Image (cartoon, rainbow, N blue to C red):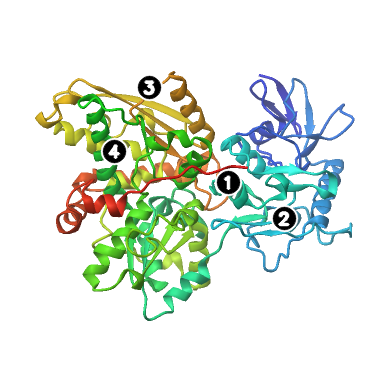
Amino acid sequence: MPKLTINNVPVDVPEGETILHAARQAGVRIPTMCHVEGLHPIGACRVCIVEVEGARNLVSSCAMPAAEGMKVRTNSRRVREARKTVVELLLSEHNGECQTCDRSEDCELQALAAELGIREISYAGEKTKRRIDASTPALLRDNGKCIKCRRCVSVCGETQMVGALFPQNRGFETVIGPAFNRDLDDVACVQCGQCAAVCPVGAITERDQIDEVYKALDNPNLHVIVQTAPAIRAALGECFGHPPGTLVTGKMVAALRRLGFAAVFDTNFAADLTILEEGTELLTRLKQALVEKKDVALPMFTSCSPGWIKFMEYFHPDMLPNLSTCKSPQQMFGAVAKTYYANKLGKKPEQIVVVSVMPCTAKKFECSRPEMSDSGARDVDIVLTTRELGKMIHAAGIQFDCLPDEKMDAPLGLSTGAADIFANTGGVMVAALRSAYEIVTGRPLPGDNLHVRPIEGLKGVKEASLKVEKVKPEWKFLEGATLNVAVANGLANARQVIEQIKSGAKQYHFVEVMTCPGGCIGGGGQPRYTDNSVRQARIDAIYREDEGKELRKSHENPAVAKLYEEFLGQPLGEKSHHLLHTDYMPREKV
């Protein structure tokens, strides 16, 4: 435990800890621009420089390990002047257009300049050349605003191991982007939006679709409905000053009604539907493998996360048969809304506009996939992120905190606690186990209040085994079987699981993968800035929502049962197979 002083305050820190973290322990905040919590420090921006007694030069606190006897000053005159110069130089190149920038008043560079008292830029010179990349449905890149902090490079390379972004050229000519300065759509980008989530400025953002929503709402010939993902209710409050993990479900519903949507529904309804389809698919594969001795693709992977699906299409096309054929809850909802719900209203699919509010930028890409149109029209028309919905509510002058708590509309608004936890890493697996175990044995899932603790939490890869005993007669082939499951969040962790499966080091029956760290609660479209403390607060809120529900198992949802009775027939039946299932294709990568 090295002992050092930060601004004359004694601090003991673990071996290998950086000066930046030692300062935090001493109650001192050092500004950063390139640092991403939990990833390797790169010391690229030089904003976090500090003075260490005896050192000739100022050092980057994010990269310099704390050492015994160090005397560190974070706010000396030398540090203040150097830090101010660094930020002025960043501003001198930054082609920001702050008056109209998407990140205005939410820009870390702007906030830091104000904090340092920068009122004018001393270094007049050439601005970074602007190049707009609008090639993907999910993301918008503006190189003119890029400050070369390399956060996007860190998360794309380390957290996701996709490597779609990288520094090219040198000096003033440095460009952060895809290889050979291509567009994102030309390289293996999964459009997860983690780059947009960590970008401190407006260089990478989601493709704004607010105007498209208003255009639909203003058309009297269209019936515009909205669905909200489970993760939204634990994060939207942050757009209005609430701490992370504040549940705002009722106020969110009220705000959406006041924006003019004809009906406010819940993606959770489709999450319950997904469990019945996906669970039946898993049990069918197990029966084919164990009883019929067929060569079926096991383990089966979940298919709810569109960034993960695209990752498999790019990097592991040989394992596409292992993906569940189920569409994601978002797409299932759209297919049901434009058939079952449209029939009830006496409307054609093209008269229904389905708007989704999602924590995920990749959902914008997913809804544009040509195969997602089994309803006779595009299943989902427009996707807004949590951030976009927050902007809409602000712009409409809706006083969010003054709204009453309202409930979702029927019939597609009823859901169980199992659907809520789809927002969390491990949630889809726990929801599936709750229903599958009870369907097979007739008894509730054993354990702690329907939780499966080993596969909950923020650990990158989690495992659990469940022994199946005293099964119903029709499931006797599972008697005494041990079901091995795994959960991964973040695509680097998913890659690790895949490699272990391919090598034979691990044998699983069912694997859940979420593209983003922490699952959907850490999605690329959630309010910034998201670190593990924020993710954990949102996770805890989602579990509170689950535990507060009267119904906590997907197969208990009466609205889903009625959907099967009136329309779909049965899980994996002909109609559900047509509307709710799909397949995927290998993609070439540059």
Marks 2 and 3 close (CB-CB < 8 Å): no
Give the secondary structure at mark 4: helix
Position in image of residue 407 (x %, y %): 29, 62
Please name the residue that numbered disc 4 is placed on.
Answer: 432
The amino acid marked with disc number 1 is: Cys
Can you identify the residue that label 2 sits on?
143
For the C terminus, the image quarter is top right
Instruction: Say left or right for 402 vs 555.
Output: right
Query: What is the distance, in whole Å, between disc 2 and disc 3 at their CAs?
Result: 45 Å
Instruction: Name the N-terminal-most of marks 2 and 1.
Output: 2
* Screen quadrant of the N terminus: top right
Question: In the image shown, does 369 or 242 lie closer to the viewer?
Answer: 369
Tell me which amino acid carries mark 3.
Answer: Gln
Q: How far apart are marks 1 and 3 (CA)?
A: 29 Å
| Comes first in the chain, label 2 or label 3 | 2
Q: In the structure shown, which secondary structural element does the residue marked by tag 3 occupy?
A: loop
Q: Residue at x 32, y 68 (%)?
A: 349
Q: Mark on residue 507? A: 3
Q: Distance between the residues labelled 2 and 4?
A: 43 Å
Front residue (pair 2, 385)? 385
**Residue type, numbered disc 4:** Ala
**Residue at 48% in and 33% down:** 494
Q: Give the mark toward the camera: 2 or 3.
A: 3
Q: Which of marks 1 and 4 is in front?
A: 1
How would you rate the neighbour count of disc 4 (Cα within 10 Å): few for under 14, some for 14-19, many for 20 or more? many
Label 1 vs 4, first from the N-terminus: 1
Mark 2: few, some, or many residues within 10 Å (few <14, many ≥20)? many
